[in-house]
Amino acid sequence: MQDLNARLCDAVDAAFDRQVDFLSELTAHPSTRGNEQSAQEFMARQLTARGYALDRWQIDVAEIEHLPGFSPVLGPYEDAVNVVGTHHAHTGKGRSLILNGHIDVVPEGPLDMWDTPPFEPRVEDGWLYGRGGGDMKAGLASNLFALDALTACGLAPAGNVFFQSVVEEECTGNGALACLARGYKADAALIPEPFSEKLVTAQLGVLWFQVHLKGLPTHVAYAGTGSNAIEAAIPLIGALREMEHRWNAAERRTDDFAHMDHALNLNVGKIQGGDWASSVPAWCVFDVRMGLFPGQSIDDAKAEIETVILDAARQNAFLRNSLPEIVYHGFHAEGYALSQDSSARAVSAIDALDRAHCAVGGDALERTAITATTDARFFGLYADTPALVYGPRAEAIHGFNERVELESMRRVTKATAMFIADWCGVETR
Amino acid sequence: MQDLNARLCDAVDAAFDRQVDFLSELTAHPSTRGNEQSAQEFMARQLTARGYALDRWQIDVAEIEHLPGFSPVLGPYEDAVNVVGTHHAHTGKGRSLILNGHIDVVPEGPLDMWDTPPFEPRVEDGWLYGRGGGDMKAGLASNLFALDALTACGLAPAGNVFFQSVVEEECTGNGALACLARGYKADAALIPEPFSEKLVTAQLGVLWFQVHLKGLPTHVAYAGTGSNAIEAAIPLIGALREMEHRWNAAERRTDDFAHMDHALNLNVGKIQGGDWASSVPAWCVFDVRMGLFPGQSIDDAKAEIETVILDAARQNAFLRNSLPEIVYHGFHAEGYALSQDSSARAVSAIDALDRAHCAVGGDALERTAITATTDARFFGLYADTPALVYGPRAEAIHGFNERVELESMRRVTKATAMFIADWCGVETR
């Protein structure tokens, strides 16, 4: 095994320049929501060239909307295409594995806040810069080149491996859910999200909602008789901040998050209202993201959010007669804690990853609870599959000058190759 | 004169169905900013068909930007075209007159808040509904059909009359300013803005500014380390509201506005920020309109606004290191009070309008001070020309289901015809 690990590491090193080129090319595809096609086409070509059996399909809402974990859809799914490449083991003696990563990236924001264009990746001082480079195209690269390392050693996993490149992770998770619905199951899943080579043992739930406000528009000369829909949002945001404070109270925290004073972040992420400086604005819409602890019910959370917003609105002379509308249009994501999975498979998978991680860097695998969600919840909550989130170090994800550390990607790729060999076993090609 | 007035009234009545059709057709042109061309083309055809000498030109910023009253431009002027039709009097014995109106309308807002589509005008119970019907296409119709009434009586004004259909009234006034720069001058100007058949004796100044905020974006999981550009706007809006309160104090009011507790309205008319619910928003821009009293200096107002915003920003831990940017992109409009014009021409013009108004409705002409601006300021402040703002009754201007009362337009058209005959004198055609 030690000899195999050394050979896998050498193989990763030998291919690393190509891996960086691959990451750079993948990051150049601006795969924001609705624009994932060229990146998925690139992934499909890469998988096909390596001999994996390719499955590519458009998400069909009708096939997933009745499933637990489904989230209300943000826009049309005509361009929402998942890509899966399958390695069918000859012997089938080993355990199976899902290697999952998402191809979608969040919007890049104003270009003038980037040092260099977000979709023209560059490497500097050991970091690759670009939107999505860290979150999580380096993870997709790691999954693919880890498998390549086995190939380079004349080996293949002795269990089936499903390489998934999914859409919709950043807003609903419906891409990963569609993989489940299509029948992809395995003994474990690995998702190299960029959490600094730590194993994620718990993640929060996430709920998205939109608040629609209507004002009573008029010429500003008569502003006293109109009502400003933009300013009407201010007390509602205040009430939501108070709710955020209550939800973070010590007695509501689960074990994994007990040490965090403020795990649940409420974020007013987007606002749009009015169309003319001299017209009292007639409408305003703002988008909110709120975190939930594992075990917290989505339905209860929604009910409380609605109560908070409507109670605040009723205290406002204008809003009382024009109550806000609350629309759900994205994440209905429950929290998930791998730490609560005491199954033999989970223990065994974590052990295997721990060994691989130690073999690369020497230190024991650190555990972390994260204040975001990942697609891990689908495997863990709805398919009884331990889902290990473990990926490279990145910075400024969702921000400007997002970057991923290339040496960290190299280490994760090596650990992943060893983990695959350990978990699935190997067979000769 | 009484006989002439009666004949003019009959002529207005005789043509009134056509006038309503004209107003309806004009209102159907969706002449929001940048989209005024088809409406101006329609106006040009109407003026040419009546034999007026047509002048149509694109506003050239270089020709007006050095002039007093110029406002910073909102967008490109490629499509900003003024139309003027001139009646050259044969005898030239009478006084000259500018009949001014603006063709631009404010945005219609969300269609679902209109009972019927904003650019498909309809007549119901004596009102014409549609965006711009009141503000101020009924005024343009009144100007044109008042002249038609003289024509129908076999007469023409004995002084030159300049019929102006200008762009840019709703954001800068640069359309009216371009008419001045092109040399259009007269002994008086009439602008039938929709103020319920009252004579406007004072109007406020208006200043537009945009506040640009930058946040420190990050994944919401790390919201504590980022800073939300949307919520950063809230204390600044609060500080601006306090400034609005101070500016409205009794001791700062001018005579025309002494009786108004709240003449100066601050309006946050537009906001836009962020692009993703799960990203801490990196930027936010909001648009503000603020009123000024006549005589209040634009430069002083800007300086105070900047101080208020920056002082509030400095009290905020994040904004202190990322100060807001204030951009001026529209109205730099000074206030104007016809009531302060004691010239013989002003007195004479007001008397003439008073007589015409009485001849139509019997009551004396009411005076009003308005809490908005109009293009009257250009004539009054920068061309020494008394500018009478007097037009029909309209409701919900800048709002939904904007409407203008047709009988009011009829009365204003009659009064305008009589005013023209009185002010300019008449000659046979």
Image (tube, coloured by chain):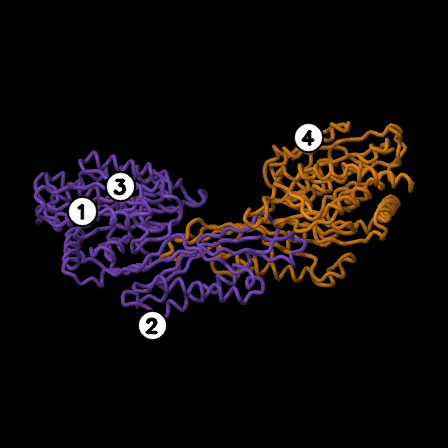
Chain colours: A orange, B purple
Q: Nearer the viewer, mark 1 or mark 4?
A: 4
Which label's residue is closer to the chain start, 3 or 1? Answer: 3
Whole-number angstrom distance, CA of label 3 to CA of label 2:
43 Å
In the picture, the quarter occupied by the C terminus of chain B is top left
Q: Is residue B193 above or below residue B19?
A: below
Rendering coords of residue A111 (x, y %): 55, 46
Q: Is residue A250 above or below residue B114?
A: below
Mark 2 neighbour class, 10 Å CA radius: few under 14, some 14 to 19, many 20 or more: few
Whole-number angstrom distance, CA of label 1 to CA of label 4:
70 Å
Read off the residue under disc 3.
B83
Rendering coords of residue B92 (x, y %): 9, 45
Asked where in the image residue B198 lies, by quadrant, the reply is bottom left
Residue type, mark 2 in image: Glu
Residue at x 73%, y 45% (from the top left corner): A406
Residue type, mark 4 in image: Trp
Tell me which chain the residue with mark 3 is part of.
B
Tell me which chain the residue with mark 2 is part of.
B
Q: Secondary structure at mark 2?
A: helix
Read off the residue under disc 2.
B251
Residue A269 - label? none
B349 relative position to A177: left or right: left
A101 or A127: which is nearer to us? Answer: A127
Could you tell me if the residues under marks 1 and 4 are in contact, i.e. CB atoms within 8 Å? Answer: no
B280 relative position to A186: left or right: left
Read off the residue under disc 1.
B414
Read off the residue under disc 4.
A57
B39 or B356: which is nearer to us? Answer: B39
Rendering coords of residue B242 (x, y %): 45, 67
Have a look at marks 1 and 4 and say if they share a chain.
no
Asked where in the image residue A98 lies, by quadrant, the reply is top right
Q: Secondary structure at mark 3?
A: strand
